Image (cartoon, helix red, strand yellow):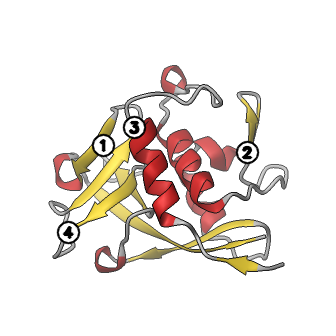
């Protein structure tokens, strides 16, 4: 398996292009619990170009009925990115707010329990504070939205390291 860099610029460009629209190549999950992780996965795919077709534990999208749980589910997205086994696709790790970069992801809990929202980071101004981290997201469509405007109870940051092919 070879490693290659994650294209952050492509992920962010995709986020800006589709933040207020839906790419017709992907189903819109707004009516089925939200479209945020579907959108996050599309951005991640734009920057990685590699899906993982492992049943159940992979990360892929063929259509509304043929997709991995990690493509549309917040906790599954996290589990896939931080997996320990060597398999194709993007690789990430949980990181601190100070290490977050455009093209990375933020997972939010509004209740203090499970993480239920998954915006993509599109800009980080100095210093890296919730006011200076700007995100794009679906469900409540946004682009360049300050992270501080969400009613966050708990947050975790996911930094994309590289892509296995």
Nearer-N-terminus badge (3/1): 3
Furthest toward the top, the residue is: 31
Q: Is 158 left or right of 46, judged from the image as shown?
A: left
**Labels 3 and 4: the sequence-earlier one:** 3
Nearer to us: label 4 or label 2: 4
| Residue for badge 2 | 68
Label 2 secondary element: loop
Q: Which residue is mark 1?
A: 143
Which residue corresponds to mark 4?
125
Secondary structure under badge 1? strand
Residue 45 locus on image (x, y percent) = 62, 53
Mark pair 4, 1: CA separation: 15 Å
Q: What is the crowding at mark 2: few (fewer than 14 residues within 10 Å), some, or many (at least 20)? A: many
Give the mark, 4 or 2, whose residue is nearer the N terminus.
2
Q: Which residue is disc 3 drawn over? A: 19
Please provide percent x and percent y for residue 43: 53, 50
Q: Position of residue 66 (x, y in %)?
A: 79, 34
Question: Few, some or many C-alpha atoms within 10 Å of disc 3 (few <14, some 14-19, many ≥20)?
Answer: many
Q: CA distance from mark 3 to mark 1?
A: 6 Å
* Residue for point 37% across, 31% down: 20
Distance from the alpha carbon under mark 1 to that under mark 2: 26 Å
Of the 4 image quadrants, the one containing the N terminus is bottom right
**In this rendering, the label closer to the viewer, 3 or 2:** 3
Q: CA distance from mark 3 to mark 2?
A: 22 Å
Secondary structure at badge 4 equals loop
The reply to whether the C-beta atoms of the residues labelled 3 and 2 are less than 8 Å apart is no
* Label 1 close to label 2 by CB (< 8 Å): no
For marks 4 and 1, the one nearer the N-term is: 4
Mark sitting earlier along the chain (3/2): 3
Verify CB contact (< 8 Å) between mark 3 and mark 1: yes
């Amino acid at each position: 398996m070879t490693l290659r860099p994650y294209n952050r610029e492509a992920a962010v460009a995709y986020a800006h292009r589709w933040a207020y629209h839906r790419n017709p190549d992907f189903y819109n999950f707004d009516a089925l619990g939200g479209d945020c992780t579907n959108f996050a996965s599309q951005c991640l795919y734009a920057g990685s170009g590699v899906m993982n077709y492992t049943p159940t534990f992979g990360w892929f999208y063929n259509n509304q009925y043929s997709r991995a749980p990690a493509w549309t589910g917040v906790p599954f997205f996290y589990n896939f990115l931080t997996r320990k086994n060597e398999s194709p696709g993007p690789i990430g790790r949980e990181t601190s707010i100070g290490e977050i970069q455009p093209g990375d992801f933020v997972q939010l809990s509004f209740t203090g329990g499970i993480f239920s929202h998954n915006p993509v980071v599109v800009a980080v101004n100095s210093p890296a504070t919730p006011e200076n981290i700007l995100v794009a997201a679906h469900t409540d469509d946004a682009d360049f939205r300050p992270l501080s405007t969400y009613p966050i109870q708990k947050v975790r940051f996911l930094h994309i390291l590289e892509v296995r092919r």
